[in-house]
Image: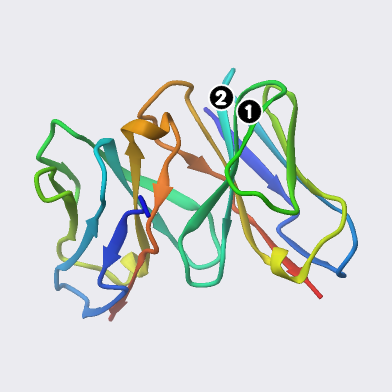
Amino acid sequence: SQTIHQWPATLVQPVGSPLSLECTVEGTSNPNLYWYRQAAGRGLQLLFYSVGIGQISSEVPQNLSASRPQDRQFILSSKKLLLSDSGFYLCAWSVSGLSSPLHFGNGTRLTVT
Amino acid sequence: SQQGEEDPQALSIQEGENATMNCSYKTSINNLQWYRQNSGRGLVHLILIRSNEREKHSGRLRVTLDTSKKSSSLLITASRAADTASYFCATDFKAAGNKLTFGGGTRVLVKP
C-alpha cells in the first residue's frame, strides 16, 4: 500500500533562518506531488506541485521554493523565513493524470518567531 | 476567485442528527471532491463526484452535484461524535489541469 511521510511534525524557527521540510511517498511510482499551506481555521492554499523529477510549478509568488530531487521526494525550502511563513504545511500525492484524489501527509506546524 | 466556498462555516448538532453542508464554485469543473480534516491532521479523501454525476453515496455520506447551479452538498446521516471535524470541498477546474482548489471548510461539531 502507499504511504506518505512528512517531517518534522512541528517546527519553531526564528525570522531569517532557513527552512527545509521533507516529504516522501512509498508504494507508488511517478506520483504528482503537492505542497499546500493552511492558515489557522482556513482552507488550503496550493504552493507548488510537481508532475515529475525536476518539474516544479509555483502557484503563488513567495519566499518559498520547492524541489523534487527524486521521483518520490518533495522538499519545501526557504533561505530566510518571514513571520508570514507561519502555518500548517501539508504535502500530498496523487496518481498522475486528471481527476485523482489527493493523499495527504500529517502536516508540519511551522511557527516563525 | 475560482475557489469553492463552503456554507455554513460552522455547524453544531447533536449526535444522531443529520449534518448538511454546501459548496459553491464559479467555473466548469472536471470533478468535485470532499475531504475531512481532524484537528491538527492531514486531510482524508471522502468522495469524488464527476461532473456528469448527480449523486454518490459512501456509507453514511451522500454527495450531490448540481452543475447548473455550480453547487454541491455533503450530507452526513446519523452523525456520531467521531464525525467532529472540518469538511472541505475541492474542485478540479477544467482550466487548471490536475490541481485541486480547496474551499475554506465547514467546521462540524457533533455533541454527544
- Give the number of the mark in front: 2 or 1: 2
Q: Amino acid at mark 2?
A: Pro
| Whole-percent x, y for residue A33 in the image | 59, 33
Q: In this image, A53 relative to B10: left or right? A: right
- Mark number displayed over residue A31: 2
- Mark number displayed over residue A53: none
Contact, mark 2 vs mark 1 (Cβ under 8 Å): no
Figure quadrant of residue B7: bottom left
Q: Residue at left 76%, top 71%?
A: A83
Hey, which residue is sitting farthest right in the picture?
A17
Q: Residue at left 40%, top 36%?
A: A101
Q: Amino acid at mark 1?
A: Glu
Mark 1: secondary structure = strand
Residue B61 visible at all: no
Q: Residue at left 86%, top 69%?
A: A15
- Mark number displayed over residue A26: 1
| Whole-percent x, y for residue B77 in the image | 15, 61
Q: Chain of mark 2?
A: A
Q: Residues within 10 Å of mark 2 (few under 14, many from 20)?
A: many
| Whole-percent x, y for residue B69 in the image | 11, 51
Q: Residues within 10 Å of mark 1 (few under 14, many from 20)?
A: few
Q: Point out the tag, 2 or 1, that comes first from the N-terminus.
A: 1
Figure quadrant of residue A22: top right
The answer as to whether the residues below labels 2 and 1 share one chain is yes
Q: In this image, B28 relative to A9: left or right? A: left
Q: CA distance from mark 2 to mark 1?
A: 10 Å
Q: Chain of mark 1?
A: A
